[in-house]
Image (cartoon, grey):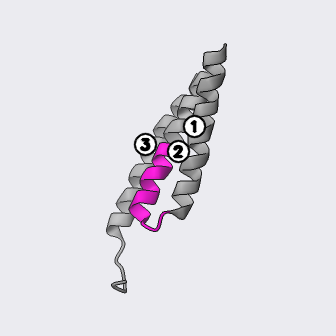
């Protein structure tokens, strides 16, 4: 039981770090990738809690499709300034 609580604490700590990192990063591409990591960590947490259907949905939509759409959008953006 101690191992499971330790795992939950570790995942929650990583979730907070990933959420803060996605807000503080200046590069949009890195922010999108960190958002994908956040979604994958949420998927792990949902699966550990026994909500496998929610975990599968989070993995496909959150970590998969959303990250791909964000990265594709970032690559298609045109910058107006060179700062």
Q: CA distance from mark 3 to mark 2?
A: 11 Å
On the image, the x and y values in percent for residue 44 come to 54, 30
On the image, the x and y values in percent for residue 2 come to 66, 16
Which residue is drawn at the image coordinates 54% and 33% (left, top)?
43
> From which residue to which does the magenta span run?
25-37
On the image, the x and y values in percent for residue 3 come to 60, 17
Give the SS element for disc 1: helix
Which residue is drawn at the image coordinates 36% and 72% (left, top)?
77
Per the image, the residue denoted by label 3 is 64
Is 76 positioned to the left or the right of 9 in the image?
left
Per the image, the residue denoted by label 1 is 42
Q: CA distance from mark 1 to mark 2?
A: 6 Å
The dominant secondary structure in magenta is: helix
Is 41 positioned to the left or the right of 9 in the image?
left
For the question of whether residue 51 can be seen, the reply is no
Per the image, the residue denoted by label 2 is 38
């Amino acid at each position: 039981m101690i191992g499971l609580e330790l795992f939950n604490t570790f995942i929650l700590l990583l979730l907070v770090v990933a959420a803060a990192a996605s807000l503080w990063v200046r590069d949009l591409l890195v922010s999108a990738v960190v958002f994908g990591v956040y979604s994958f960590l949420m998927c792990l947490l949902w699966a550990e809690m026994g909500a496998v259907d929610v975990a599968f949905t989070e993995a496909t939509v959150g970590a998969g499709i959303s990250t791909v759409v964000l990265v594709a959008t970032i690559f298609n953006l045109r910058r107006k300034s060179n700062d």
